[in-house]
Amino acid sequence: MTRSERGALAAAIIGSATVFLDGTIVNIALPRIGATLPAIGIGVLEGQIYIVAGYMATLAAFLLLAGALGDRYGRRRMFLAGLVGFGIASMACGLAPSLDVLALARLVQGVTGALLVPGSLAIITSLFEGQARGRAFGIWASATSLVAVLGPPIGGAMVEAFGWRSTFLINGPLILLGIGLAMRYVPELKPTGASARFDWLGAAVAAIAVGGLSFGAIRGQQTGWSEAVPFATLGVGAVALVVFPVLMLRRRDPLVPLALFRNRTFTAINASTLLIYAGLYVLLYVQGLFLQGVLDYSPLAAALVTLPTGLALAFLSAWAGSVAARIGPRPFLVGGPLLMAVGAAWWLRVPPGSTPWRARMDTPGSLLPPLATLVDPLPAIVLFGIGISLVVAPLTSTLMSSVPVDRAGLASAINNALSRVGQPLASAAIFILITDRFYAALAGAVPGLDPRSTELRASVQPLNVPGTDVEAAVAEAARLASADAFHAAVFVVVGLLVAGALVNWLGLRSGHGTPAR
């Protein structure tokens, strides 16, 4: 590998790693963000969901558009635009004066991050061939797995030592390094003969469908469905969702050629991806809030206890991919989600009174976890981590073997988008479930409490520590109600994972998928 190739590969790794890192590290900072940043026009939990789900929604909605822009205007040019935009958005997040501004900046992060994900893979594909390409992708996968392993604990330590803003501001030096490497080592990579046509209308309709449904459900639940805006956005999103497949059938160059879905394997893989990754992202989101907002874990402890998931991905994914190539992917794509479901279900036995782990960097003795950590959250996280490690590589290889080579890029973009689009939609539904369950349980535990009171909802939010002015009895009832709401969300996650396993059981035959025509 030449020096130029190493530099270009490093730029691609930085570009994709920052996007992946910002999709996970922020979960650790959410409780601190909710406790310290003022919310003006939105609720605390609502803002926290926008910070996570809004980022993923815009990232998913613009992935296909970003890939097409790279093909048309040049991959180096769009990759650099993504780096600059992502860096500016990260600074805006780190300096945000309110929860509202932070949520908006996260949306911009998602849009600019969409330019980096397909751009990174396109750069590697264009610069390397044969075995060199395989080795480059292996280095890329190892590096991004390392980010997944080290990112959350480092983020937890940063939140403890420097505050939550540091988790965004750290992107600045990384982005500057990526820009320098890309400008020096990445040549312009505009494919010859690229089609000038692009389905801009299809891209807009897809974004409206995802954004309308997600925002409408979240905002409506936060305001008690007392405003017209949530109903209007839900309606627009629903109409866009219905119109999208019809539009794809009528467009000359559709954003998503529906002919691809005539292949049984391709359809099954994408359907299970939507279900499995929705369950994955939702659990990671509510799990972080439960650990800190209910069990009273420190940010560092919440990061350390989830470390086994990243370790399993780093060390088991390659083995799962090689074995699945020999015996077929079906056992992995059925057994993996079921093991994830068992891990998620373990959370149902974790009581709200479980002894918290308050690890701090300045107190070495606190870094040793209590026994309750080893018997309550840790088994859930280990089982879930092993399960997802059995899924990732076989799912990707099966997807790519189900389509012709000339459609591999499009197939990858569709699957990548589906793996992210399920998260904001599922988060919106989970938000409704959690808030309904929480305030109903709170009202039942504290006689005379009005669960629809705006004052109550401003000071007592599900899965978050109540304000200091809240009575002790109400605060304790809120903690128990949060645990009840969390367990309700876990049931949904388990259902999504089991459904994903069932789709793979029914949709995948023994052996590998055949290419779609």
Image (cartoon, rainbow, N blue to C red):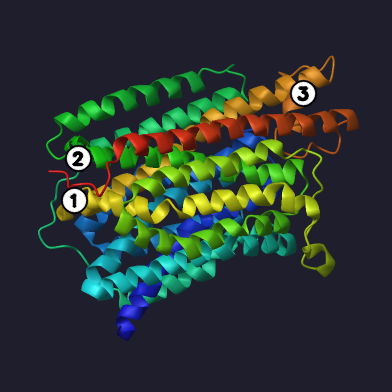
239 relative position to 469: left or right: left
Which image quadrant is residue 357 in? bottom right
Distance Cα–Cα, label 3 vs label 2: 49 Å
Find residue 442 and name its label: 3
Q: Quadrant of the C terminus?
A: top left
Does the CB distance between marks 3 and 2 fall below 8 Å?
A: no
Does the CB distance between marks 2 and 1 fall below 8 Å?
A: yes
Residue 472 place in picture, x, y as percent: 90, 32
Secondary structure category for the residue under label 1: helix
The kind of residue on which mark 2 rests is Leu
Q: Do we see residue 96 in this rendering?
A: no
Pointer 3 or 2: first along the chain: 2
**Farthest residue toward the left?**
193
The kind of residue on which mark 1 rests is Arg
Q: Which residue is mark 2?
A: 260
19 relative position to 4: left or right: right
Nearest to the observer: residue 86 or residue 272: 272
* Residue count near mark 2 (Cα–Cα under 10 Å), binned few <14, some 14–19, many ≥20: some
Nearest to the observer: residue 202 or residue 304: 304
Residue 215 place in picture, x, y as percent: 49, 31
Pointer 2 or 1: first along the chain: 2
Look at 27% across and 38% down and name the residue there.
267
Look at 50% across and 55% down and name the residue there.
89
- State whether residue 234 is above or below residue 82: above
Distance Cα–Cα, label 1 vs label 3: 52 Å
Secondary structure category for the residue under label 3: helix
Look at 82% across and 21% down and name the residue there.
445
Residue 242 place in picture, x, y as percent: 30, 23
Secondary structure category for the residue under label 2: helix
- State whether residue 183 is above or below residue 381: below
Find residue 407 and name its label: 1
